[in-house]
Structures are given as structure tokens and as C-alpha cells.
Image: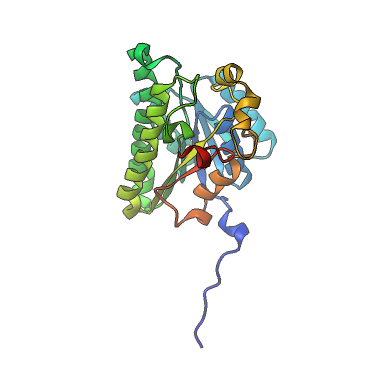
Amino acid sequence: MSSITPTRTVQQLFDLTGKTALVTGGSRGLGLQMAQALGEAGAKIMLSSRKAVDLEESVATLQAQGIDARWIAADCADANDIARLARETLERMGDIDILVNNAGAAWGAPAEDHPIDAWDKVMNLNIRGYFLLSQQVAKLSMIARKQGKIINIASIAGLGGNPPGMTTIAYNTSKGAVVNFTRALAAEWGQYGINVNAICPGFFPSKMTAGTLKALGEDKLAAHAPLKRLGDDEDLKGIALLFASSAGKHITGQWMAVDGGVSAVTGG
């Protein structure tokens, strides 16, 4: 009689017990939401952002929920800080199984008047930083072990242009670059067992989007979505866990919009 190896249960596929996740831009908003999801699934969490005081507060929140969480303050637009972040995470927590590239910046200005220093700031953090940290983590931890999950946070702004009233040419360009960076990296690093995927959020209330939401109106923006709502504090948890876990082991080089259906009707 032939023996059949039993497949894992759904609960086992989504279980991150024993895994370590590094989440940049993790002290608030979408980054903290994803860190919470991965921690609830059993992963140890290293949060990073620029401000220690925000990180201390967020880590205390996660720890109060029973999540093994720690923090390192670092600027993901700075190559030296990026190298230090990768190295210190390994020293303190061991191998990095999951990397969530989430740190980001936006800048609003008409394209014809957009400051070059603001363009560089957005590009350095939103795409150059993703590349440098992915490179460091892969070389120090993932490639040799032939395993790893990299999740890049893009945006539906990277799938097309803006509605009237939004002037974020650098942000849109950087997030479009993240989408193809994800594809290219997945194609190259698949041989090492590394999955690379992107999440493209729509509008979520956050510190970064507060100005836009106020200017354009939350109700008006929600009305453009087939689901007639903006994102909330739960809406990225499921897709982040899918991309980070064995449940998504055969998914790589893909992007998923989490936008209430906006990109389905705008052609993104």
C-alpha cells in the first residue's frame, strides 16, 4: 500500500510560531497593523521606525497582547542605518524569516513645481530603502538558508494616475517602482526559496493620508470604492499573514490591491 503524506491543516499553514519578522515603519498605522497580525500568528516581531518614543509605545502595546516584540530606531533612507538594522536584528533575534518593507514617505506638489529634494526623499525611502534592506536581509539570513518571505508595501497610487486634486507624482512613481521591483526580485530570488510579494493598499486613515483625506473628504473617497468604505485597522491583516506564511508558499512576484475595489473600476 502506498502511504500518503498528510497535508497540513489550515491552522498549521498560517502558524508563524518560531518565525521572526522585521517590520519597517512599524510604530503606527499599516505597519503596526501588520506587525500585530504576524505576532498574533506566533512570530517574534522586530519593529523599526525613526522615532524611539513611538516604537517604545507600540512595542508595549504588542507585548501587552502577549506578542514577543522589540524595537530598533533606524532611518530606512540611510544606507548605514539599514545595514545596522539588519545586523542588530540578527544579533538580537536570530535569523529573519519575514521582512515587511513598509517605511514610506509622501509629498504633495504639482509636477511642474515638485522640489527635487522632496523627489529624492520619497525615492530614497520608498524604493531605494526597500532594495537595500532586502539585499542586506537576504545576504545575511535568507539566501544561505534558502527560505524567506519579503512583503513590499506599494499602493494603488503605483497602479495609475491620481483623481483630480491629488498631486503626488513622486509617491506614485515610487510605488509603481515597488510593484516591478517585487516582480523582478521574485524572479531572481525564487531559486533561493524566497517569496517576494507586494500589497497595494487603497485609502486607509493614517498620519500620512490625513491631509489628503481632509482635502478630498473621507466620504467622497469612500464613495468611489465599490464597497463604499475606506480601509480600517483589520484590512491588511489577512493578506499580510497569507504572504508571510506557508499558506502562500506558491505565491511570488504578485501584488494584491486592498482598496475596497477602487482599482477594479479605475483600471489599476
The reply to whether residue 59 is visible in this rendering is no
Q: Observer-nearest residue: 133 or 130? A: 130
Q: Observer-nearest residue: 105 or 164? A: 164
Query: Residue 180: where, in percent of width, then height?
Result: 35, 40
**Is residue 52 shown above or below 243?**
above
Q: Residue at 35% of width from left, 13% of height from top?
A: 112
Query: Residue 150: where, in percent of width, then height?
Result: 43, 43
Q: Observer-nearest residue: 109 or 180? A: 109
Q: Taking 241 as reference, is 125 left or right?
A: left
Query: Residue 232: where, in percent of width, then height?
Result: 64, 34
Q: Residue at 52% of width from left, 51% of height from top?
A: 245
Query: Residue 249: where, in percent of width, then height?
Result: 46, 56
Q: Observer-nearest residue: 259 or 104? A: 259
Q: Residue furthest right?
A: 64
The reply to whether residue 65 is visible in this rendering is yes
Q: Residue at 40% of width from left, 34% of height from top?
A: 86
